[in-house]
């Protein structure tokens, strides 16, 4: 089952490599990984999406918690949560394609953020399935380049992951 | 406040931490530190002949004393040579701090001479590692390193020290922190009261209970609490090879150790139990055999300081995260005041069954009129030293024979590489023990394969006068490899035989020690007595033993706990 694990990590050199090392060392999957400092500059927030049986996920969270630099973590998929990923796509856009792409971008509530005579660069945010859906809708033949940020997530409601 | 250079701060921090011995080997990047060591005499340095041995020495010291060991090496090859030793300590949760020199911070990343990314190389085999980025940080980093190494589930901590952090003429204010606080590291200090209550209820209601104790009892200094609980409740106890000595082996409630080469009665009792109380052990594959066939009728209570050890391979019904001594103390109190008592009839018939198993096998082996059996060497050593020696071992058949036939009644006396299985561990570990226990008998039980992996340390023993006794069970083959080849590869002995063994007696003499060879069975006792009487000498005892002996019992691969070979021909 797919899980989103959100981690507060000491913002120190080498801390990220411990997390990544743990996954490869113990044969766990990483599907996406995002990391950036938080409003508290001593902390980074890291989101990792992974798959595994309940037993494996339990081990992942326990082993992550064992890392000295991991301050706190939560498995967001255990409760209601919001998940977002940012995508930038460069699309071939000439002739009648230009209007067609514009319409599709509007339907997906994306934005065209850069334009040349033959290329549109589209920005789109949403959960991972929505981003997959957009690529499908415009068709892979017109796609010149895709860059995705990986998943970030946050719990719904009052629940907060902080110190 | 005093002004000290980074190198002096490092050594002062070790003094303030109460470190008496460090084991190491100098080199370019560590020379400022070595100079600071030279200018004081509180911290004593032991110069080994290979960095791996320094780590095993620190490890032996830590296992015998319960205190963290300390290693000092230089960058590059000095640091990488410690890796096997660090991994050994990591697998067995041994507290240790390894201080590594590093090239100057301005050179890091430039492939400088003797540069290795020790933070990266050591990461998978340490509890934590720390890098010094400013000399002023040194006291706090050293305090943190020892705190992390020794608390919670212990383990090795590496400190990487770039050479420019120890420059002699740059001085900073020195103060050694009394306490260290890490917001992200808070090992449990007691177990969950509700879970402990539940565990005690289950324990008292059990009909076929068994206590399965591990190295965590020794690391957590909880032998007394465990012994008291087991004696009070009257249940059978077995332990892992890492837990040997946590409960007196000579006691009738003790079934010996369990697992791949464990006793018949311990493995049978585990398999047929209805309740397992696991204390500081981790259901390792050498204990459980095939996990899907593991103890089908048993409910499991698991006490461990490390939550990740619980339900990792075998699911626990009642997990208790906490220090074993505190949890056992609370259990003991609850057992004492409980109204319900163990079911006397059920426990009596359980003991009857166990005694039958004991009588059926009871660690037998066939003796021979003329060939020396490795088992009888160990039995004799146990008798001649009253079971009170510190015994270190290397890895292989001799390790299993030593663990099976030397009866330990006290913790911290059986010292082996149980998790990583590191050949070459035993001799330097024995040296680390002897250094701090000069009046105790220290035996290194080894084989002609393992001993050659760190034999250069005979030279260190000469320098520091470390009269350990090396008991070389010489069967002229890599015995355990050969046993597996006999059992699984139709006796095709691929590379398990060494044709050009050295003359170990001459070798010991070349290093300035004594050597004794025992070839005849009738000489065994007299010569061993002579050796043990040579208190001030390191004696290399080369004993020619049966070349064809196998270790039994041996669990059948991928079977349950009760599926065992009891000899070359008997399978149950």
Image (cartoon, grey):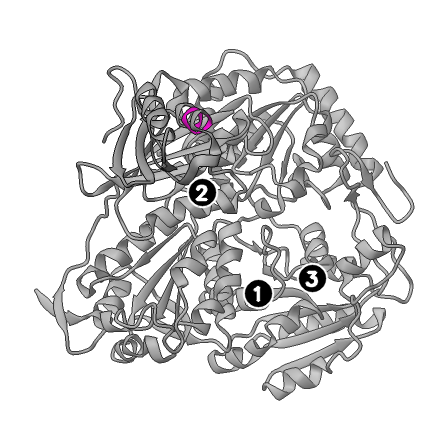
Q: Residue at x 80, y 60 (%)?
A: B482
Graded by Cα atoms within 10 Å as few (under 14), some (14 to 19) or many (20 or more), the crowding at tag 2 reads many
Graded by Cα atoms within 10 Å as few (under 14), some (14 to 19) or many (20 or more), the crowding at tag 3 reads many
Q: Are marks 3 and 2 on the same chain?
A: yes
- For residue A137, which quarter of the picture? top left
Farthest top residue in view:
B339
Residue A133 magenta-drawn?
yes
Which residue corresponds to mark 3?
B381
Judged by its main secondary structure, the magenta piece is helix
> What segment carries the magenta color?
A132-136
Which residue corresponds to mark 1?
B442
Q: Chain of mark 1?
A: B
Q: How far across and down, in percent of the image, does residue B183 sit?
A: 25, 39
Residue B220, disc: 2
Q: Chain of mark 2?
A: B
Query: Is B561 left, or right, of B550 in this rendering?
Result: left
Residue in front for this viewpoint, B56 or B409: B56
How far apart are the two marked residues, 3 and 2, measured between alpha carbons? 29 Å
Farthest front residue in view:
A95
């Amino acid at each position: 089952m797919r899980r989103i694990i959100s981690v507060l990590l000491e913002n120190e050199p080498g801390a990220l490599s411990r997390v990544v090392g743990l996954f490869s060392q113990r044969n766990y999957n990483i599907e996406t990984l995002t990391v950036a400092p938080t409003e508290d500059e001593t902390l980074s927030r890291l989101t990792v999406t992974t798959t595994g049986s309940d037993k494996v996920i339990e081990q992942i969270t326990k082993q992550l918690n064992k890392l000295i630099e991991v301050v706190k973590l939560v498995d967001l998929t255990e409760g209601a949560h919001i998940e977002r990923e940012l995508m930038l796509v460069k699309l071939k856009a000439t002739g009648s394609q230009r209007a067609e792409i514009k319409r599709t971008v509007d339907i997906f509530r994306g934005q065209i953020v850069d334009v040349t005579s033959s290329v549109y660069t589209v920005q789109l945010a949403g959960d991972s399935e929505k981003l997959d859906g957009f690529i499908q809708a415009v068709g892979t033949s017109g796609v010149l380049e895709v860059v995705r940020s990986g998943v970030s997530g946050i719990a719904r409601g009052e629940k907060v992951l902080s110190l | 406040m005093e002004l000290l250079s980074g190198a002096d701060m490092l050594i002062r921090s070790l003094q303030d931490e109460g470190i008496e011995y460090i084991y190491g080997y100098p080199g370019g990047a560590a020379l400022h530190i070595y100079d600071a060591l030279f200018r004081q005499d509180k911290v004593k340095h032991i110069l080994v002949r290979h960095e791996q041995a320094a780590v095993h020495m620190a490890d032996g010291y830590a296992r015998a004393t319960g205190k963290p060991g300390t290693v000092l090496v230089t960058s590059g090859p000095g640091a990488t040579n410690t890796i096997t030793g660090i991994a050994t300590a990591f697998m067995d949760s041994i507290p240790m701090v390894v201080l590594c020199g590093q090239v100057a911070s301005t050179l890091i990343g430039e492939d400088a001479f003797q540069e290795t990314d020790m933070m990266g190389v050591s990461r998978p085999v340490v509890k934590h590692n720390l890098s010094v980025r400013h000399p002023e940080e040194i006291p706090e980093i050293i305090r943190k390193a020892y705190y992390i190494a020794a608390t919670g589930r212990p383990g090795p901590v590496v400190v990487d020290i770039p050479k420019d952090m120890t420059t002699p003429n740059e001085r900073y204010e020195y103060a050694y922190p009394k306490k260290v606080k890490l917001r992200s590291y808070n090992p449990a200090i007691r177990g969950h009261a509700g879970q402990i209550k539940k565990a005690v209820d289950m324990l008292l209601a059990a009909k076929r209970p068994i206590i399965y104790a591990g190295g965590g009892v020794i690391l957590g200094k909880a032998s007394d609490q465990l012994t008291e609980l087991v004696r009070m409740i009257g249940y059978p106890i077995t332990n892992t090879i890492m837990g040997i000595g946590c409960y007196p082996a000579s006691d009738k409630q003790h079934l010996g150790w369990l697992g791949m080469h464990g006793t018949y009665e311990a493995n049978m009792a585990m398999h047929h139990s209805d309740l397992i109380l696991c204390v500081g052990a981790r259901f390792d594959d050498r204990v459980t055999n095939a996990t899907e066939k593991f103890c089908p009728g048993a409910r499991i209570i698991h006490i461990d300081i490390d939550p990740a050890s619980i339900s990792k391979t075998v699911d626990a019904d009642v997990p208790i995260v906490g220090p074993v001594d505190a949890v056992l103390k609370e259990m003991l109190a609850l057992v004492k005041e409980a109204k319900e008592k163990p079911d006397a009839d059920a426990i009596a018939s359980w003991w009857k069954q166990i005694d039958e198993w004991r009588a059926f096998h009871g660690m037998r082996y066939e003796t021979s009129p003329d060939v020396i059996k490795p088992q009888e060497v160990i039995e004799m050593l146990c008798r001649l030293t009253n079971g009170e020696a510190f015994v270190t071992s290397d890895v292989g058949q001799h390790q299993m024979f030593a663990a099976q036939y030397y009866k330990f009644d006290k913790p911290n006396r059986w010292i082996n590489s149980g998790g990583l299985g590191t050949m070459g561990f035993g001799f330097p570990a024995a040296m680390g023990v002897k250094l701090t226990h000069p009046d105790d008998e220290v035996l290194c039980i080894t084989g002609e394969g393992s001993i050659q992996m760190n034999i250069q340390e005979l030279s260190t023993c000469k320098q520091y006068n470390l009269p350990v006794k090396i008991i070389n069970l010489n069967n002229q083959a890599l015995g355990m490899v050969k046993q597996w080849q006999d059992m699984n590869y139709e006796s095709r002995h691929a590379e398990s035989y060494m044709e050009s063994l050295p003359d170990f007696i001459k070798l010991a003499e070349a290093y300035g020690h004594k050597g004794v060879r025992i070839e005849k069975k009738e000489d065994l006792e007299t010569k061993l007595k002579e050796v043990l009487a040579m208190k001030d000498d390191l004696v290399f005892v080369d004993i020619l033993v049966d070349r064809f002996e196998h270790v039994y019992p041996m669990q059948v691969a991928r079977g349950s706990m009760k599926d065992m070979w009891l000899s070359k021909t008997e399978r149950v």
